[in-house]
Amino acid sequence: MNKCWNEKIEFMSRDEMHALQSERLVSQVKRVYENVPFYRAKMDKEGVLPGDIKSIDDLGKLPFTTKQDLRDNYPFGLFATPMDEVVRIHASSGTTGKQTVVGYTAKDLEIWSECVARGFTMNGADSSSIVQVSYGYGLFTGGLGAHYGAEYMGATVVPTSVGNTARQIQLMVDFGATVLCCTPSYATYLGETMRDMGIDKSQLKLKLGVFGAEPWTEPMRDRIEELLGIEAHDIYGLSEIMGPGVSMDCREKNGLHVWEDHFVPEIINPDTGENIGADVNGELVFTTLTKEALPLIRYRTRDVSRISYKPCSCGRTAVKMAKPSGRTDDMLIIRGVNVFPSQIESALLEVEEVEPNYLLIVDREDTHDTMEIQIEVSPENFADNVRGLEALTKKVSGKIQSTLGLAAKIHLVEPKTLQRSEGKAARVIDKRKLY
């Protein structure tokens, strides 16, 4: 058996999990109906009463919850507990509308910490680990989520947060960090900066990287592992459901185990809301089974994923979700073609002469959509001669067109020309929205 934190849950049979989920769902639905006016009104409108929910099989009878519902009930309208039981507030910002505000009771925080500890442990971390947390701290859930999860398993935490990259690298060397937690884009930035500082990865004691908050590809995982000399793993979460730790991939690296004793995943058709089952791409939906302060029923994440109940060779029975490939609300429609930014990253990682640092600019001339992609050339391949750059531009253009099914104007730029992100990478400027 692989190393685990919670053997009973991580290796529970499907029948046992079904029974546990059913018991918790029945209790949760009754609780939100009695304590959250929003849910009571929504269920009454749909003609659904708590007594109609007898098992997890009845989940589809319940209405969806959206981010807009949280904004409409800003700040605390969806809380199911009085404020004197809420011990922490987090909030996520968006490009439009109000922030989505989430609250936690002491029990919520303990469950969150335990879920993160499960993910760390199944990938080799333990109480002897030194965990450098380079996610942002504050209202963003990333920093404190990883921090409390690492402390929960007894590890030593170095809370560096984001920024001051050279200092972070020096602390990694001096303190002997064995686990790094940050966004994947920042992990590549750390690796590049190490290279520029003349620090070899052999000088680090890093063994494990836990990266999330952005969609990222398998070639990006390969690149991070090569840059930092570590095993890179994906952690998934969103503040509305809990924060990082809703799921995490194991050492098989072929899907993220969802801690479904607390969070029930569904995959739906984003246009119809129909549950489309396992092994099919669609929109990921979560129902929280144990959250006290902010329980959410069938929350539409807008993340594009799929789930699989096929046995995992690691031995864990928890359902696996695919690494999100994009978001239904981040999807760009350009000349009638659906484009996800992660597709561009995937294409660029197949061209060794360029870096996966890009800026996609979409505009409209008259009624025609235009697409320009600014891409950094890697330092070792940058050439001043026009012929060399023209050949590389043609190569990249062909790869992008093959991947997207669309032609794009490719603009190669010098290394480190594009703004680097020390938090979540901003990759897209859609000027059409200004019209």
Image (cartoon, rainbow, N blue to C red):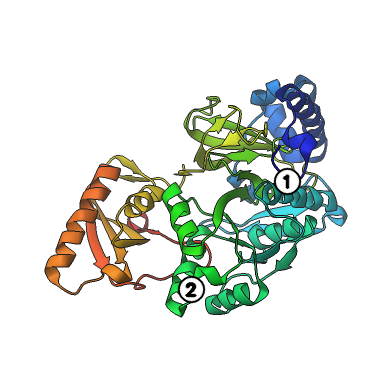
- Residue beneath the point at 67% across and 34% down: 316
Task: Residue 375: name its quadrant.
Answer: bottom left
Q: Position of residue 172 (x, y in %)?
A: 61, 72
Judge the density around disc 2: few (<14), some (14-19), many (≥20) Cα neighbours within 10 Å: some
Q: Residue furthest left?
A: 387
Residue 332 in the figure: left or right of residue 252? left
Any part of residue 366 in sight? no
Residue 435 in the figure: left or right of residue 202? left
**Quarter holding the N terminus?**
top right
Looking at the image, is 169 positioned above or below residue 252? below
Q: Position of residue 286 (x, y in %)?
A: 64, 37
Q: Position of residue 420 (x, y in %)?
A: 44, 70
Q: Nearer the viewer, residue 409 or 78?
A: 409
Q: Secondary structure at mark 1?
A: loop
Residue 195 in the figure: left or right of residue 306? left
**Quarter holding the C terminus?**
bottom left
Residue located beneath label 1 in the image: 78
- Residue beneath the point at 48% across and 67% down: 191
User: Three-letter amino acid code at disc 1?
Assistant: Leu
Residue 318 in the figure: left or right of residue 310? right
Any part of residue 107 in sight? yes
Q: Nearer the viewer, residue 76 or 31?
A: 31
Residue located beneath label 2 in the image: 194
User: Three-letter amino acid code at disc 2?
Assistant: Met
